[in-house]
Image (tube, grey):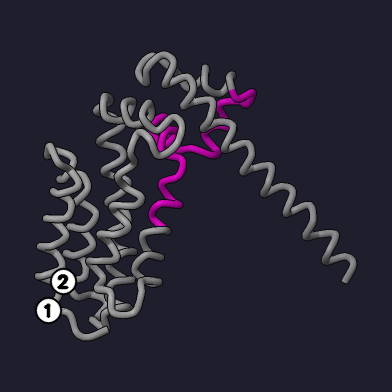
Amino acid sequence: MSDDRNAAAPAGRRERKKAATRQAIADAALRLFLERGYDDVGIREIADAADVSTTTLFKHFSGKESLVFDRQDEMKALQLAAVRERPEGQSIPAALREHALRHRRLRPGDEPGVAAFLELVNSTPALLDYQHATWLENTAALAQVIAEESGLPADDPACTALAHFALEAPRAARRHHDSTEALHRAFDLLDHGWQSIASPA
C-alpha cells in the first residue's frame, strides 16, 4: 500500500506543476496583449515572459488565440452542469438562459481586469471568431445532455437545434443595444418552442 501512496504523490505534484505552468503562460500572454495589443505580440515573446520554451507553450495551448480563452473548457463544462443540475421544474432553455446571463455576459464591474479583457476581445476580429467557433464545439455534448435530460432520442434533431441556438444566442444578443433584453428575447423563443415538442422530464 505504501508503494501506491508514493506513486500517487508525484503524479499529484506533476499535475499541479502543469496547471501552474499553463496559468503562468496564460497570464503572461494576457498581460502582453493588454499592454501592446493582440496583433503586436508574438508567441516567442509570450514564452519568454512566462519563462518557458515555445515547445512547452504549445504543449499547453493550440495556438495564439487559445491563450486568451484558457478557461473555455471550464465554461463548457459549467454549461453542461447547468442543464444536468437545474432545479426541479425548470425547463432546459431556462437553465441555459440562466447560465448565459451568469457566465457569458461579463460586466466591467464584475471583477478586476474584465473591462480591459472585453475590450481586447471585442476589438480583435480574430479573437471574436475564435471564441465563437470554439464555443460552438460544445454543440454535440450539449445536445447529448439535453436528450438525456428530456427523454428524447440521442439523435433527435430538436436537441441539436436547441443546443446550437442556445450557443448562438449570446453572440446574436451582443449586436443589440440592450444585449440583456435581446438575450431574454432569444431564450423566450427557445423556451416556448421547446415546450411544444419536449416530453416531460
Residue 145 horizontal/vertical position (percent): 33, 71
Q: Residue furthest right?
A: 2
Left or right, 39 with reference to 186? right
Q: Residue at x 60, y 25 (%)?
A: 50
The kind of residue tagged 1 is Ile
Q: Which residues are magenta?
A: 50-77
Q: Which residue is mark 1?
A: 197
Is 75 contained in the magenta span? yes
Residue 7, quarter of picture: bottom right
Looking at the rendered image, the disc whose residue lies closer to the viewer, 2 or 1, is 1
Is 149 contained in the magenta span? no
Residue 96 horizontal/vertical position (percent): 28, 62
Contact check, label 2 and label 1, Cβ < 8 Å: yes
Query: What is the secondary structure assignment of the residue under circle 2?
Result: helix
Left or right, 15 with reference to 47? right
The kind of residue tagged 2 is Ala
Query: What is the secondary structure assignment of the residue under circle 1?
Result: loop
Q: Which mark is residue 158?
A: 2
Tell me if mark 2 has few (under 14), some (14-19) or many (20+) residues whose alpha carbon lies within 10 angstroms of its own.
some
Tell me if mark 1 has few (under 14), some (14-19) or many (20+) residues whose alpha carbon lies within 10 angstroms of its own.
few
